[in-house]
Image (tube, grey):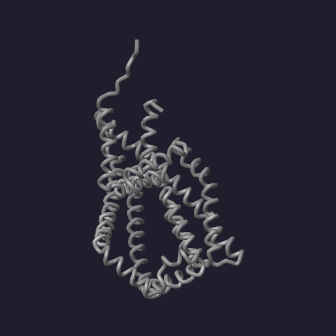
């Protein structure tokens, strides 16, 4: 005689709502809002115990939310101000930038095989012409890109507001959840926990990757008599891009190889080889860091990333580690895996 343990209907309904919600986030382009909200919520929970030593629980959360909100607003303001200052400076001057690109192309032409140089612009005028034609042909896409950037900023801010409100509500009142609300609240808590684990593990990975890259660019190459331009910028790009799983390394490596190509083809090959070797070594370290946090093996995460990228593109790549870790946690708690 077999005994079947049926799940309560409120629990089944909460799972269905969670699955539908995650699918809606990806299909409707709400990933930035979700992750910004979860990030602020996680940071508030991280800071609250430290502040609680001098204040009550609710006061600590209020102080943490106010402090983080101030930091977020300050960071965005400084970022906008930095872009404006850069564009007004000599380094950001369009003519100077075009000349630097032309110099880079000219140097690259001397290093590349003849059959490959035919695809590069001949001089700065040819480069301007190509850029102008490209902008004219894709004016509609450029306009849409500007609108999308505005939407992303709005989603970012709204997500942080919602995350701070949820963090405050956790201590502002006594909760007496009914069965469905309690089950749904548990789904949200599990998602927040896995987001916290994956994101902070990814920060550690990015820091390690940036340290290795910084040693290569700022220490090893200068000792060998090679001084590449834009070293600080490349190190900064490596850290920021490294926060994006998988694709971040591709972005930073591409930038480093292109800049190395301006020095010599030989240097570009050395940079590419170094990055490949370093990332192969980091592969095991990354798998250990994230896998230990979310109880998942490297091949599981890579498979999830591949499937999510196929279905949802770049948002799928970013969401895959968090969503897969959350699904596995839910299955693990039910004793299914």
Furthest residue to the right?
224
Asked if residue 144 lies left or right of residue 99, the reply is: left
Residue 133: which quarter of the image? bottom left
Asked if residue 181 lies left or right of residue 98, the reply is: left
Q: Considering only vertical position in the picture, is 202 above or below 334?
A: below
Position in image of residue 325 (x %, y %): 46, 44
Q: Considering only vertical position in the picture, is 99 above or below 43?
A: below
Position in image of residue 219 (x %, y %): 67, 71
Position in image of residue 311 (x %, y %): 37, 50
Q: Considering only vertical position in the picture, is 67 above or below 198?
A: below
Q: Residue at x 63, y 71 (%)?
A: 217
* Residue closest to the eye, 154 or 179: 154
Is residue 280 visible to us here?
yes
Position in image of residue 16 (x %, y %): 31, 38
Q: Residue at x 42, y 66 (%)?
A: 71
Asked if residue 190 lies left or right of residue 294, the reply is: left
Is residue 60 visible to us here?
no
Asked if residue 328 lies left or right of residue 177, the reply is: right
* Residue closest to the eye, 263 or 73: 263
Furthest residue to the top?
1
Quadrant where the N terminus sits is top left
Q: Considering only vertical position in the picture, is 315 above or below 94?
A: above
* Residue closest to the eye, 236 or 131: 131
């Amino acid at each position: 005689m077999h005994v079947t343990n049926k799940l309560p209907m409120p629990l089944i309904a909460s799972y269905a709502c969670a699955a539908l919600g995650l699918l809606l986030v990806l299909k409707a382009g709400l990933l930035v809002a979700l992750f910004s909200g979860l990030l602020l919520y996680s940071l508030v929970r991280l800071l609250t115990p430290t502040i609680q030593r001098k204040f009550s629980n609710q006061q600590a959360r209020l102080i943490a939310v106010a402090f983080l909100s101030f930091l977020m607003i300050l960071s965005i303001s400084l970022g906008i101000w930095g872009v404006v200052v850069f564009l007004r400076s000599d380094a950001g001057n369009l003519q100077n930038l075009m000349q630097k690109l032309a110099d880079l192309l000219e140097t690259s032409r001397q290093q590349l095989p003849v059959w490959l140089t035919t695809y590069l612009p001949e001089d700065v005028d040819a480069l301007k012409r190509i850029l102008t034609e490209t902008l004219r042909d894709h004016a509609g896409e450029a306009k849409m890109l500007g609108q999308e950037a505005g939407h992303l900023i709005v989603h970012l801010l709204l997500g942080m507001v919602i995350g701070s409100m949820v963090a405050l509500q956790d201590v502002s009142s006594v909760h007496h959840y009914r069965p469905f609300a309690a089950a749904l609240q548990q789904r949200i808590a599990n998602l927040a926990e896995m987001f916290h684990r994956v994101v902070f593990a990814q920060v550690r990975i990015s820091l390690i990757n940036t340290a290795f890259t910084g040693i290569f660019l700022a220490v090893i190459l200068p000792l060998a008599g090679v001084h590449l331009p834009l070293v600080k910028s490349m190190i900064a790009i490596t850290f920021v891009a490294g926060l994006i799983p998988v694709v971040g390394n591709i972005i930073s490596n591409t930038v480093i190889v292109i800049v190395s190509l301006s020095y010599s083809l030989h240097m570009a090959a050395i940079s590419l080889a170094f990055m490949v070797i370093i990332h192969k070594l980091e592969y095991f370290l990354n798998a250990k860091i994230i896998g230990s946090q979310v109880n998942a093996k490297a091949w599981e995460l890579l498979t999830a990333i591949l499937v999510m990228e196929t279905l949802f593109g770049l948002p799928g790549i970013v969401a895959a580690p968090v969503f897969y870790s959350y699904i596995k946690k839910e299955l693990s708690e039910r004793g299914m895996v």
